[in-house]
Image (tube, helix red, strand yellow):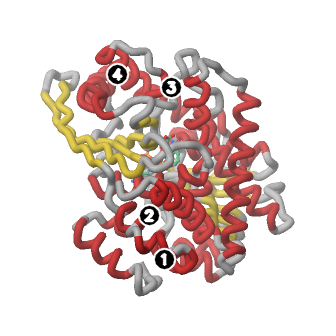
Amino acid sequence: MNARLDEKLEPIFQDVLHRNPGETEYHQAVHEVLETLGPVLVKYSEFADKKIIQRICEPERQIIFRVPWQDDSGEIQINRAFRVEFNSALGPYKGGMRFHPSVYLGIIKFLGFEQIFKNALTGLPIGGGKGGSDFDPKGKSDDEVMRFCQSLMTELYRHIGEYTDVPAGDIGVGGREIGYLFGQYKRITNRYESGVLTGKGLGWGGSLARKEATGYGTVFFTHEMLKARGDSLDGKRVVVSGSGNVAIYAIAKAHELGAKVIACSDSAGIIVDEDGINVETLKRLKEVERRRIKAYLEYHPKAKYTEHGNIWTVPCDIALPCATQNELNGNDAKTLVENGCIAVAEGANMPTTPEGIQLFQDAGLMYGPGKAANAGGVATSGLEMQQNASRDSWTFDYTQKRLEEIMIEIHKSCYETSVEFGAEGDYVLGANTTGFIRVAKAMNAMGVI
Ligand code: NDP
Ligand code: 2IT
């Protein structure tokens, strides 16, 4: 955390450090937002008087619980799960569940904090929340995943609901897990409450284009950044980290808009395919067979695999980090800049370290932070909630059109805010400020709650 904070904001940050010891990712996420809020407090002094920032930094509710389950050999396993209901000024808490062994309170709080502003940017009536568990789905059988999800929901059900808190997927949580979670919620409550979870399967309340939405949205946002400078995706070399839900559909949409994605990765290694990454192969390997990216070579022997390689050393015009937090550091940013990269858009949440962001901004790159660039996923979850509320289901084309309009609008409002605050093209300031002002105005109107 390099940039200095405004003198009004530094004590607020010190208090966050003091009250949330050891939660480094949460500290990082708060610092990044506070860095941009100085001018907002000058313009809206009532936000300072009413301690809006201090209140936003304290989650409305945090739930931590035990998840016991039995593995296939009959042994009892114990995981820990979280749901952080961060802010409900704009609507019910909304945000995904992450299943990954690295999950602890600090990760869920950073994600929940980001989600508040991201969700505000979508313009839809959704508050911010996040949850997850240190459960590792890798290597588990379907039955084990089912038993774990059922046990988790046996506690979580009492905290969520269509008008209260609406979870969805994130790392390690996709259609399979949402199915098991929804089934257990329905069974315990005896209610077919479609709007309690999003990312559901097609045919039982899910929305077309939700699976594709985050990756597609990130590429729509990238396209808008390029258009604002009279450029386009056509013919661009793109590198996408990760090979999960967000990465796959970012690659698909980048190809559709004329770019060539030449590299992707997983936590074990990177694939470079100069012919362009084959999306059908990726889908088969990752969505159906749940295998490692290395297996891509079996279908495309001319591609190159590097165990534990660094994807950011692959020269490209556009970089889309779509894996996880802090996956792109200052050195990586320097390499990308030196290799002529012109734009970075974050499909993942907080993938770039503060040093990396600073380097991109100093170099004048187009840099779209996750809160704006990956908001298409939660926005389409909002559209799924709309379809559930009206007991309707929309076509793929209509839903995708709505997603594209939302991404265009997010880009526009971030850009306009950057101009208003004298930092044209600074999407970090644009996203943080726009999202914050929307939440702060609602909180202010609702009194001290
Ligand atoms: P998936 O579980 O589908 O895929 C995650 C990908 O990232 C995998 O390739 C995984 O590799 C890699 N990865 C995850 N953790 C690590 C790690 N610690 N180190 C290295 N690689 C890692 O998740 P999603 O695609 O859904 O999520 C990716 C990112 O996008 C996350 O930051 C998530 O918060 C964000 N996001 C997701 C949204 C959604 O709708 N799903 C919406 C907005 C943001 P491996 O398989 O080897 O672990
Ligand atoms: O980080 C995110 O925005 C998500 N994982 C999606 C949240 C959602 O509720 O769809």
Q: Which residue is mark 4?
A: 185
Number of residues whose C-alpha sits closer than 10 Å to that of mark 2, classed few (under 14), some (14–19) or many (20 or more): some
User: Which of labels 3 and 1 is toward the front?
Assistant: 1
Q: CA distance from mark 1 to mark 2?
A: 18 Å
Residue 308 in the figure: left or right of residue 245: left
Q: CA distance from mark 3 to mark 4?
A: 13 Å
Q: Mark 2 and mark 1 in contact (Cβ < 8 Å)?
A: no
Say which label, 3 or 1, has the lower sequence index. 1
Q: Position of residue 35 (x, y in %)?
A: 48, 77
Q: Nearer the viewer, mark 1 or mark 2?
A: 1
The picture quadrant where one finds residue 44 is: bottom right
Q: Is residue 43 above or below residue 138?
A: below
CA separation in Å, label 3 and label 1: 37 Å
Q: Cα distance, mark 2 to mark 3?
A: 29 Å
Give the structural element (helix, strand or loop) at label 3. Answer: loop
Q: Quadrant of the N terminus?
A: bottom left
Which residue is located at x 13 percent, y 29 percent? 76
Secondary structure under the numbered disc 1 in the rendered image: loop
- The residue located at (29%, 48%) in the rendering is 61
User: Which numbered circle lies on residue 416?
Assistant: none
Q: Which residue is mark 3?
A: 200
Q: Earlier in the sequence, mark 3 or mark 4?
A: 4
> Which residue position holds label 2?
326
Q: Secondary structure at mark 2?
A: loop
- Distance (Cα) linking label 2 and label 4: 34 Å
Whole-number angstrom distance, CA of label 4 to CA of label 1: 40 Å
In the figure, 399 relative to 57: above or below? above
Check the image and report above or below for 246 versus 238: above
Q: Where, by quadrant of the figure, is residue 363 drawn?
A: bottom right
